[in-house]
Structure formats: structure tokens, C-alpha cells
């Protein structure tokens, strides 16, 4: 249906498949390197993301950016970030199964066009959609699975970490595991990577 990224983005920006389209300020399509070897998939936009049209720009996004920089990753350089649903659920509630189903073809095509070697699911809804319905984020975060030709891992959502500060250390351990897997696979992700910054757990 869509031959390239611009066609896909245009289709997504004009989408009216579900009720979320009626309440949005902006479609939050995604941001980053469209040739990235590492792709992050969150759950749904919040209020700040809806206003800006960019994923992970609130407090959770600030925490995510800090952890990314600590392992040589940057949303503007060597990764791509998007969400399971591209429009904000009201009140920042969890996306409903039918909303995820309606929006999933956009994510599926993003993955097909980007062809990442590694996919990171931020939060249980993304992980349950891409890894398995029975995925338990508290037990299975940081473990590697296969998704077509990519490796895939579930991590805690940054908003969850902000609410549960005791999970910051295991969450950052998952980022270190991601860094190690990038090195193990010999990916070119770090070719133009930013300098590593310290992250205080």
C-alpha cells in the first residue's frame, strides 16, 4: 500500500481509522534515523507528545534520552523511536486492543521499511503486541527474543521508572545489555554515535 517512508507518513498523518483521531492535536508518527539498526517502540503518546508531534518528549522522554546517551545512542542520530499507537489516548490511558489493531499496520510498515536489527519495546503493551500476549514485563524485561529477522527485547517504560524509582537500576542494566548486543552483532550503530555520558542510577 505504501512504497516509501514519505507515503507511509502521509497516510498516517491523515488517518481516521479509530476514535483517537478525533481527539488528537498531532499524529505522533516517529522520529530518528530512518535507516537505524536499533528501533524503539513505545505504547502511545502522552499530552506533551500530542502537542509536539514527537514521541517521548515529557519527563519520561528526558529520562529515556539520558539512558540512551549513556550507551552511545541518540534519537537524532542512530536510532528510530515510535509508538504502538500514533494518537494520544484520552487522559494518557493505556491504548485499547482495537486501537492497537487499527494502528498496527503503520508500525508494521515502519519496521519493514527501516529493517532494524534490534527492536526495543518500551512497556508491556508494545512487548505484548510484538513479543507475545503473555509477556510479563516485570519478569521478562531484558531478555532477547526473535522478531522476524530482528532481535527484540522488552524494557520498562520510562514513565513506569519515574513512578518506581527502585526499578531504575534494573532498567539501566537492560540498556547496558542492549549496548553489549549492539557490539556483539558488530552493528554500525556507533559509527556516528554521540559521546557516552554518565548515568547516575
Image: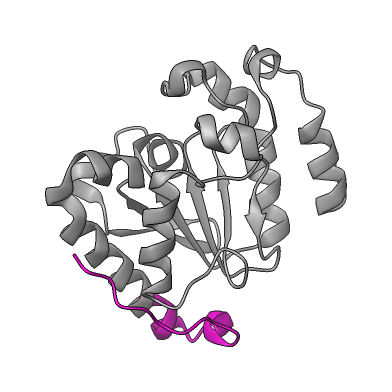
Q: Quadrant of residue 24?
A: top right
The residue that appears at 45% across and 82% down in the rendered structure is: 185
Res. 196 visible in picture? yes
The residue under the point 22% across, 66% down is: 173
Q: Is residue 140 above or below residue 170?
A: above
Q: Which residues are magenta?
A: 181-201
Is residue 138 part of the magenta span, yes or no?
no
Q: Quadrant of the N terminus?
A: top right
Q: Residue furthest left?
A: 166
Q: Main secondary structure of the magenta part?
A: loop
Determine the residue positioned at 54% across, 82% down.
Answer: 193
Image x and y of residue 140, in percent: 23, 49
Q: Is residue 152 visible?
A: no
Q: Is residue 166 above or below residue 89?
A: below
Residue 182: percent from left, percent from top:
43, 78
Residue 16's spot in the image, x, y percent?
Answer: 76, 18
Q: Quadrant of residue 39?
A: bottom right
Depth check, front residue: 22 or 51:
51
Amino acid at each position: 500500500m505504501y512504497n516509501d517512508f514519505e507515503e507511509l507518513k502521509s497516510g498516517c498523518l491523515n488517518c481516521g481509522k479509530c476514535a483517537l483521531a478525533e481527539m488528537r492535536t498531532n499524529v505522533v508518527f516517529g522520529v530518528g534515523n530512518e535507516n537505524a539498526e536499533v528501533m524503539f517502540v513505545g505504547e502511545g503518546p502522552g499530552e506533551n507528545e500530542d502537542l509536539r508531534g514527537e514521541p517521548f518528549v515529557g519527563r519520561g522522554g528526558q529520562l529515556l534520552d539520558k539512558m540512551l546517551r549513556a550507551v552511545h545512542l541518540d534519537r537524532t542520530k542512530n536510532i528510530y523511536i515510535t509508538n504502538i499507537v500514533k494518537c494520544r489516548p484520552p487522559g494518557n490511558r493505556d491504548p485499547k486492543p482495537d486501537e492497537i489493531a487499527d494502528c498496527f499496520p503503520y508500525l508494521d510498515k515502519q519496521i519493514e521499511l527501516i529493517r532494524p536489527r534490534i527492536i526495543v519495546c518500551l512497556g508491556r503493551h508494545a512487548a505484548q503486541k510484538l513479543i507475545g500476549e503473555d509477556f510479563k514485563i516485570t519478569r521478562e524485561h531484558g531478555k532477547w527474543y526473535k522478531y522476524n529477522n530482528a532481535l527484540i527485547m522488552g524494557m520498562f517504560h520510562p514513565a513506569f521508572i519515574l513512578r518506581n524509582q527502585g526499578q531504575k537500576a534494573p532498567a539501566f542494566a537492560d540498556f547496558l545489555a542492549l549496548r553489549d548486543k549492539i557490539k556483539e552483532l558488530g552493528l554500525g550503530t556507533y559509527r556516528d554515535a554521540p559521546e557516552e555520558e554518565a548515568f547516575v542510577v
